[in-house]
Image (spheres, helix red, strand yellow):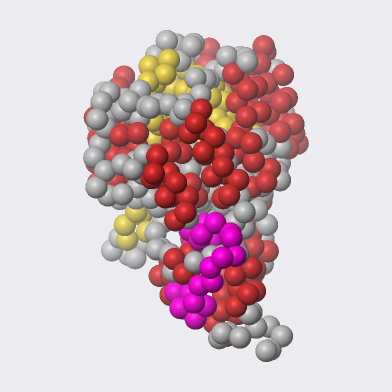
Amino acid sequence: MKQNEITRRGFLKYLGAGATLAAIGCKATDSDNAAPTHVAAGTGEMTTRTNPKTGQKVSLLGYGCMRWPTITNADGEEVIDQEMVNRLVDTAIAGGVNYFDTSPAYCKGFSERATGIALARHPRDSYFIATKLSNFAPETWSRERSIEMYRNSLKELQTDHIDYMLLHGIGMGGMEAFNGRYIDNGILDFLIAEREAGRIKNLGFSYHGDVEVFDHLLSQHDKYKWDFVQIQLNYIDWLHAKEVNPRNTNAEYLYNELHRRNIPAVIMEPLLGGRLASLNNNLVGRLKQRRPDDSVASWAFRYAGSPEGVLTVLSGMTYMEHLEDNLRTYSPLDPISPEEDRLLQDVAKITLTYPTVPCTDCKYCMPCPIGLNIPAIFAHYNRCINEGNVPSGSRDPDYEKARRAYLVGYDRAVPRERQASHCINCGVCEPHCPQGIHIPERLAAIDNIVEQLKQNTMS
């Protein structure tokens, strides 16, 4: 065997011992909520939670506007499908959804505009807009540029006030970045003044990364009076966030710190970037045995919505079937029982045995200067890892069929000119990743696997 060849045993080691053929030849979709298409919309009234500051009812299902559907225009460019966005928003509002979360950074900078167009067709008092001051780049840290970004959000969203305004991604870059973005330039004081003037109704922040910044902001709660905080919470991150990504903080800690201060929590990544909507067959079978008519994704959404301190749970619903399934889950919510919680914690421990990349498909790493589709590369790899059997060593797949299926699936999921083999290790993407993924390193590892699969036959 040549030195760079990968053996059948080595391939299984890469993909998780006991991986099945289905794990390698998995379907290539860019969904973050793989719900069955036949699921009908909600069967009752949308569950709501009360904002303790305003007394307003907020839908437990919130619309995350990070992943609006796209089409290719006449010039060959990928653009937001505004007609479909309008339909999704109309269906969501009709189903009781009233919380829409966007950012200047989403959808290559066009999410706020598309969201504003869709929402402006409805009465302003029928929905709440959440957006963010996404001044990540140092060139936007100045007071002037940050205020310009905030005012542009009002313009794009076609509104004279923001219902839920967030400092975006505090913790990324630690205290130095937080101070540069919000303190040294006086922007946090500016936003507080905007809240006092009524142009911001609720002020909060979203958290990724360094927990020192999270703890610092909560220690200043008496001064800043945070109205809400957005955190990552799902049944894996509740106790195992650091096992997924060492820089993350367990959701149990984050939620409890908020709850004891009576600060409502807005939940992001309830599906952990889609990972919890696409479990392996063994785990799917266990969940289906308990609730045969429910989608796998609905378990994660029920879990995220069950804690009483949760104000709303965000879902980036690209497709109508995702929206319909989530409407069903929250109309009304059937909270997770203690027995179901034990089952999900067991599922979490098993899922953690699969060596996936902790990518949540946020697309902050995009666009890649040379055109790679970084999230799609990671999504295909993760999907194939995650859909394998529970590692038991009791079954061996047919290596040749698995090898071919993986490669065919890769070409379907990611055009060849946008695959990992073209990475030049420029590193432009890495500072933008809220999960702190060493992106070029991971791309190189995936490309190494792919190249060996292309070259190797059964050893």
Q: Given the current orientation, which residue lies at the most extreme bottom position?
A: 1
Rendering coords of residue 195 (x, y %): 52, 16
Toward the viewer: 270 or 24?
24
- Left or right placement of residue 137 versus residue 310 in this view: right
Point 65% across, 22% down: residue = 257
Quadrant of the image containing the N terminus: bottom right
Point 51% across, 27% down: residue = 338
385 in the magenta segment: yes
- Asked if residue 300 shows in the view, the reply is yes
Rendering coords of residue 93 (x, y %): 28, 30
Point 49% across, 19% down: residue = 308
- Left or right placement of residue 368 versus residue 10 in this view: left
Q: Is residue 64 above or below residue 388?
A: above
Query: How many marks are shown on the rendered structure?
Result: 0
Toward the viewer: 127 or 269?
269
Q: Which residues are magenta?
A: 379-407
Q: Given the current orientation, which residue lies at the most extreme front position?
A: 394
Point 67% across, 36% down: residue = 249
- Asked if residue 183 shows in the view, the reply is no
Rendering coords of residue 377 (x, y %): 52, 63
